[in-house]
Amino acid sequence: MKTRMIAAIALLSIALGTQAQKHEFANWKRYANANRELGTPAKKDKRVVLMGNSITDGWPGKRPDFFKDNRLIGRGIGGQTSYQFLLRFREDVINLQPKVVVINYGTNDIAENTGPYNEELTYGNVLSMVELARYHKCKVILTSCLPAGGFSWRPAINDSMDKIRKLNARVQEYAKKNKIPYVDYFSAMVNAEGTGMRSDLAQDNPGVHPNEKGYEIMESLLLPVIKKVR
C-alpha cells in the first residue's frame, strides 16, 4: 500500500510539473533577456516603456524607426489581457526604471481571451498599473482601446464597440480627474459609421490591428505627449 501511494504521488508530481511548465500565464520569459541586457538606466536616460498587447507588440516591427529615433522600449505581448499585464508589470516596467510608461489595454479583455469580460475588473487592473507606476515615480500615459468591430477569433462577440466605448469613457474620466495624459486613438481611427476601425488603417478584417498608416496616426497623437512628460 505504501509503495502504491509513493508511486501515485510521484506520478501526480510529474503531471503537475509538466502542466506548470506548459502554463506560463503572464509569459515572463518573453522579455527576460532583453530586460537584463538593458540594465540600470543612466542618469540622463529617460526611458519610455510601451506596455500592451499585439497592437503594441507589432508596432516596432512595422515602424522600427519610431522606436529607435525616440528611444522607446516596446513591451507588448500578443493575445494578452490586462490581467496578464498586471502580473508582469514589475518585470517589464517597474524594474526597468522608466521615466514614463504608456499603457494600452482592453482589446483582449473584451475579446475574452482569458475569460468572460468584466469591465469592473479590467478597469481595476488599469488603475492598479497606474498606482504601481506612480508609487515608483514613473509617469503614466493612458491610451484608449482602439476601435474593433469584432474579433476573427471570437466571432460570437457582437457588441465589442459598445464595450470599448464604455471602457474608454471610464478610463478617460479617471485620467482627467487624476491629471494623467490620455491619448485618444479611438476617435482618430473609428470609421464614419462608428462600427469599427477604418478599413484603410487596419491590416485585418474585422479591423483590430493597425497597418503602417494606422500606426502613423497613433504616433502623431502619442509622440507630442511623450515629449511633454518625458
Image (tube, rainbow, N blue to C red):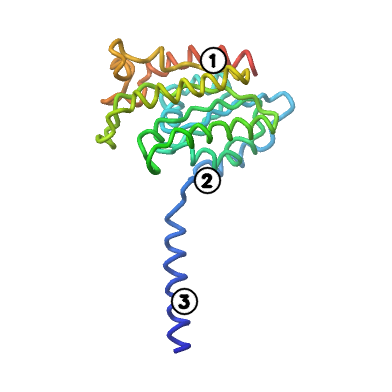
**176 relative to 15 in the view: left or right:** right
Q: Position of residue 110 (x, y in %)?
A: 38, 33
Label placed on residue 223: 1
Mark 2 surroundings within 10 Å by alpha-carbon count, few (fewer than 14), some (14 through 19), many (20 or more): some
Q: Is residue 183 above or below residue 17?
A: above
Q: Nearer the viewer, mark 3 or mark 1?
A: 3
Q: Position of residue 56 (x, y in %)?
A: 46, 28
Between residues 74 and 65, which one lies in front from this camera angle?
Answer: 74
Q: Position of residue 58 (x, y in %)?
A: 41, 29
**219 relative to 89 in the view: left or right:** left
Q: Which amino acid type corresponds to the residue marked 1 in the rendered image?
A: Leu
* Mark earlier in primary sequence (3, 1): 3
Label placed on residue 9: 3
* Mark earlier in primary sequence (2, 3): 3
Identity of the residue drawn at 64% across and 24% down: 139
Secondary structure state at the residue bearing disc 1:
helix
Quick one: quadrant of the C terminus? top right
Q: Position of residue 54 (x, y in %)?
A: 41, 32
Q: Nearer the viewer, mark 2 or mark 3?
A: 3
Q: Is residue 12 above or below residue 27?
A: below
Secondary structure state at the residue bearing disc 3:
helix
Secondary structure state at the residue bearing disc 2:
helix
The answer for how far apart the CA atoms under marks 2 and 3 are is 29 Å
**206 relative to 73 in the view: left or right:** left
Q: Which residue is mark 2?
A: 28
Q: Which amino acid type corresponds to the residue marked 2 in the rendered image?
A: Trp
Identity of the residue drawn at 44% across and 37% down: 81
Q: Which amino acid type corresponds to the residue marked 3 in the rendered image?
A: Ile
The answer for how far apart the CA atoms under marks 3 and 1 are is 56 Å
Mark 3 surroundings within 10 Å by alpha-carbon count, few (fewer than 14), some (14 through 19), many (20 or more): few
